Amino acid sequence: MGEITLVRHGQANSAATNEADYDRLTELGHQQAAWLGDWINAHDGPFDSVYSGSLRRQRETVAGMGFTDVEVDERLNEITYYDLTAEMDATGLAPPREGPDDFAVHFPATLTAWRDGVIKGNESFVQFSDRVQAVINEAAQPGKRILCVTSGGIIARAVAHILHLDIPQMAQIALPILNTSVHRIHVTPQGPILGAFNSAPHLDHSDRLAARTHY
């Protein structure tokens, strides 16, 4: 049996109002990545291959975890949520998003509008779904352990595909995903099985509770 381990990047600049400004780790984000790397070294087995998206926050996370032999794959990049938000605001279909706390309402509405073609983004929802499924399919190698450092939207889409979830449920999957959380997919002859979701053992310390961040 093979295994795919998906890791979300560390805390990024959630005070940003555009994609470029968001795409860098905070000081805490760097620390989260280092803690996760330490935990993996102490408790997990070696990986046959390590992949990362090309976004800065993803590359900083995998480097902070201590990995140097990393293959960059843009299919692991997050959706351009700030761009989709700007389009969504222009439609007037949802209240304008003013901060991270609006995510719970704005995200499912934005995903639905994107899927239905009301907003376009830099790729269609179908293209997004197809690239996520393609990279997961390629990582699903029998007998191999593959690590992919990516983002919450990619993880939510991968989980939604395995569990056959629609947009509202995919949004619910995305909302609680922690920075530097660990998600595991078991590769079996019968197909992929979700083995773990949103675990953060490196943050399970009384003095790290405040380091458990969603944004």
Image (tube, helix red, strand yellow):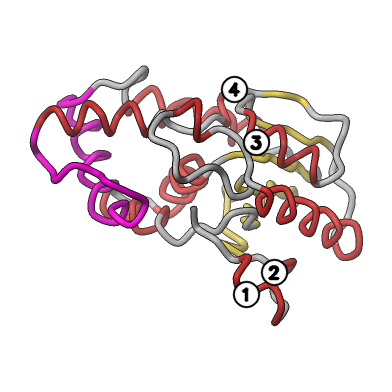
Between tags 2 and 4, which lies in front? 2
Q: Is 99 a magenta residue?
A: yes
Snapshot quadrant of residue 25: top right
Q: Are marks 2 and 3 in contact (CB under 8 Å)?
A: no
Image x and y of residue 158, in percent: 49, 44
In this view, the residue in front, 13 or 188, is 13
Q: Is 192 a magenta residue?
A: no
Between tags 1 and 3, which lies in front? 1
Q: Amino acid at mark 3?
A: Gln
Q: Is residue 25 above or below residue 159?
A: above
Q: Are marks 1 and 3 in contact (CB under 8 Å)?
A: no
Find the distance from the CA under tag 4 to the CA under tag 3: 11 Å
Per the image, the residue denoted by label 1 is 209
Find the distance from the CA under tag 1 to the CA under tag 2: 7 Å
Find the distance from the CA under tag 1 to the CA under tag 3: 23 Å
In this view, the residue in front, 196 or 13, is 13
Between tags 4 and 3, which lies in front? 3
